[in-house]
Amino acid sequence: MSEIEIRQATPSDAKLLTDLSFTTFWDAFAHHPKNAPDDLNHYMRQAFNQEQIADELAEPNNIFLIAEVDGKPAGYAKLIVHSTEEGITANRPIELSRLYSHQEFIGKGVGQNLMDACFERAKQHDHDVMWLGVWEYNPRAQRFYEKNGFREVGKHTFQLGEDPQTDLLMQKEI
């Protein structure tokens, strides 16, 4: 496989990120029997439309990183500076809000390269903890985060349409 390039997204990446986030979320969750199609579609229409993504890109506390292989979008991550919630123990937290790879790149280092870039960004900005929420029915992602030093510290609710789902809260000291 070619080299994986990681770059910070700019406002001009709104369309690219909209397409990338929609596709990767759909691929990750659409075929899971716990996700009702109506709930998934409702959430995705709200979260992954171009206006919403452009607003998120414009928000100064959001950092989007895009992974590319041969100039082709392969995955992305979204960090949120100063985001926290109950159960997270940190003075200068940063949330890993999203980390997704295109299906064709899963297991080929894209996710790990994005994770490493997120850790590097957190260190550069002197964050002491990175935290995230991961769906309780996503053991592959849980193992990936555990391999990267995250540990479970609690739970919270993730609203997927009308379905309140449980995410495990995980954090890692930086």
Image (tube, helix red, strand yellow):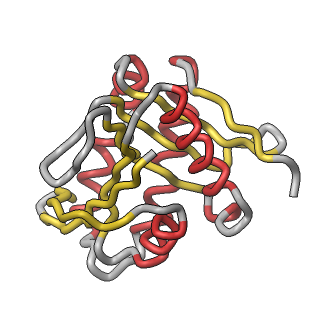
The residue under the point 62% across, 64% down is 103
Q: Is residue 51 left or right of residue 68?
A: left
Image: 21 above or below 65: below
The residue under the point 35% across, 19% down is 59
Question: Can you see residue 46?
Answer: yes
Name the spot of residue 18 as percent of width and height, x first: 48, 37
Question: Can you see residue 38?
Answer: no
Name the spot of residue 130 as percent of width and height, x first: 39, 46
The residue sitting at the right extreme is 2
44 or 90: nearer the eye?
A: 90
The residue sitting at the bottom extreme is 33
In the picture, residue 164 is in which quadrant? bottom left
Name the spot of residue 4 as percent of width and height, x first: 77, 46
**Quadrant placement of the C terminus:** top left
Name the spot of residue 138 as percent of width and height, x first: 39, 74
Q: Is residue 70 left or right of residue 135?
A: right
